[in-house]
Image (tube, rainbow, N blue to C red):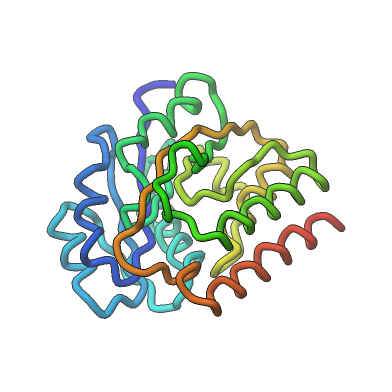
Amino acid sequence: MKQPLIRVIIPAYNEQDSITKVIKDIPDIVTETIVVNNNSVDKTPKNAKNAGATVLSETKMGYGYACLKGINYIISNNLETDIVVFLDGDYSDYPEQLVEIIAPIINNDIDFVIGSRVKRLRESGSMTPQQVFGNWLATFLMKLFFNAKFTDLGPFRAIKFEKLLALNMEDKTYGWTVEMQLKVIKKKYSYVEVPVKYRNRIGVSKVSGTIKGTILAGVKILSWIFKYSFK
């Protein structure tokens, strides 16, 4: 592959204290960093813009809504793009590892790469017990039903843009990551996982940090898996 055109999409809701750090740590090989402000009531959009990102606004609340907004921006502006990287705005991931995330796509023509938050590289307390269990259950079921090799539902991920469009992503909220992985399996895309570091996020998680968020995410993830297991 020639030097690829890489765009990063970062959904962000009230991440004013972390978003600048995330953007500043993204490697220079990235063509454009797109922050999708999802109804923040703090300085998230201002800080993101000052850090050099393209800032979009999505008023419908939901991780999937924000991701779709970023994708539609690329499409509607006819922006040539080879690889899209999804990254959270809470600084729990290490943006500089983007180089490692995209390497299998560039060097081995892999379609899809997950940053796997392996235990040996995780900071203590960076994933809640319910997150660890939820990831284990979801990936166990994907292995059971589809013989998948995934070990994580990590949000730090990269995919060839043309392959992403072919997935016809639908989920608007908590099921975005697992929907992508299930569709990658169904379409028989090539995929690998790359071990990544993971630290305690800045601020409180909107999903795992609340009982409601944890339950809703769990229900959505399991519903996607069972929906595809009977297709």
Q: Residue at x 50, y 67 (%)?
A: 208
Q: Is residue 231 visible?
A: no
Q: Is residue 44 visible?
A: yes
Depth check: give the residue in front, 156 or 109: 156
Depth check: give the residue in front, 162 or 34: 34
Which image quarter: residue 2? top left
Q: Is residue 175 above or below residue 23?
A: below
Where does the N terminus fall, quadrant-wise?
A: top left
39 left or right, relative to 159: left
Q: Residue at x 48, y 36 (%)?
A: 120
The extreme front residue here reads: 124
Q: Residue at x 35, y 35 (%)?
A: 97
127 left or right, relative to 202: right
Where does the C terminus fall, quadrant-wise?
A: bottom right
Q: Is residue 135 above or below residue 94?
A: below
From the top left corner, tell me how far across and down residue 183 is, in percent.
68, 49
Q: Residue at x 72, y 36 (%)?
A: 188
Which image quarter: residue 222? bottom right
Which image quarter: residue 44? bottom left
From the top left corner, tell me how far across and down residue 200 is, in percent.
36, 55
